[in-house]
């Protein structure tokens, strides 16, 4: 598979405690900005932040609605390793992964356990982990390298993806986190936008965070 040699940035809009048209506005803005190469939702069944009784959209239904309103973010053949979808997907009782298979390499989200990292090493072409404790992230990435080596797989064949929360008020915090992630070898960066989204949020993210880090 192609190696990712430069950072590729995307956005995530958690579909909770926010209106559909607010999310749609951000995705349409991002759709017109080439530096934003992928976009994400999640598939939780209730808000995981803010008002626990507030509104929340089912991830794949909302993804379908947004796909109908955008042209570049989701449906592109030129960049087959931009993974757009839900960065959390419920399986088992609530979600079946079979109907949502896509013609892309598999992606596994998480990385808080060594057992999952062994699965990633054997099966996944993209591994996503939440940021925060960069030393922990680096340690787990090194463990993934070791597991890949044990099965004679090139560790560079697994794209390292990281989710980083965005701070509108203190962009330097997010800038520093992006720099640490890139220095640690992560080339697929998902920037989590908190709601409410300011006007021209996608352009702000591009100007303040992406172009200063790419």
Image (cartoon, rainbow, N blue to C red):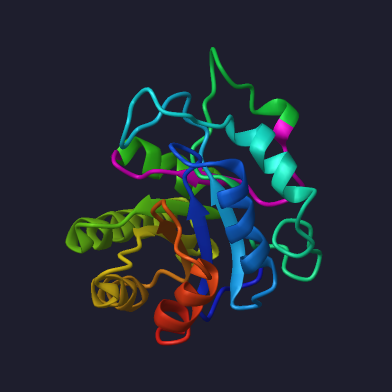
The residue at 54%/23% (across/down) is: 91
- Where in the figure is residue 15, as x and y percent of width and height? 51, 40
- Where in the figure is residue 88, as x and y percent of width and height? 49, 38
The residue at 70%/62% (across/down) is: 73
- Where in the figure is residue 129, as x and y percent of width and height? 37, 51
Q: Is residue 29 above or below residue 119?
A: below
Task: Write down the quadrant of residue 164 in the picture.
Answer: bottom left
Q: Along the line of sight, which residue is nearer the eye, 79 or 212? A: 212
Q: Which region is colored magenta?
A: 100-113
Q: Is residue 92 above or below residue 154?
A: above
Q: Is residue 183 above or below residue 1?
A: below
- Where in the figure is residue 114, as x and y percent of width and height? 30, 40
Whether residue 142 is in magenta: the answer is no
Note whether residue 124 is visible.
Answer: no
| In the displayed structure image, the side of residue 3 where residue 198 appears, left or right | left
The residue at 73%/42% (across/down) is: 65
């Amino acid at each position: 598979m192609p190696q990712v040699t430069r950072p590729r940035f995307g956005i995530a809009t958690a579909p909770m405690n926010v209106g559909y048209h607010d999310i749609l506005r951000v995705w349409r803005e991002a759709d017109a900005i080439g530096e934003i190469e992928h976009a994400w939702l999640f598939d939780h069944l209730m808000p995981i932040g803010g008002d626990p009784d507030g509104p929340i959209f089912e991830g794949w239904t909302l993804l379908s609605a947004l796909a109908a309103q955008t042209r570049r973010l989701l449906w592109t053949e030129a960049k087959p390793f931009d993974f757009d979808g839900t960065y959390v997907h419920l399986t088992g009782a609530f979600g079946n992964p079979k109907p949502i298979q896509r013609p892309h390499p598999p992606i596994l989200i998480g990385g808080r356990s060594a057992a999952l990292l062994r699965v990633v090493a054997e099966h996944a072409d993209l591994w996503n982990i939440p940021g925060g404790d960069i030393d922990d992230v680096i340690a787990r990435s090194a463990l993934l390298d070791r597991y890949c080596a044990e099965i004679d797989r090139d560790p560079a064949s697994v794209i390292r993806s990281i989710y980083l929360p965005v701070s509108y008020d203190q962009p330097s915090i997010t800038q520093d986190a992006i720099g640490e992630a890139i220095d640690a070898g992560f080339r697929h960066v998902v920037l989590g936008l908190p709601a409410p989204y300011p006007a021209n949020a996608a352009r702000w993210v591009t100007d303040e965070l992406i172009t200063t880090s790419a």
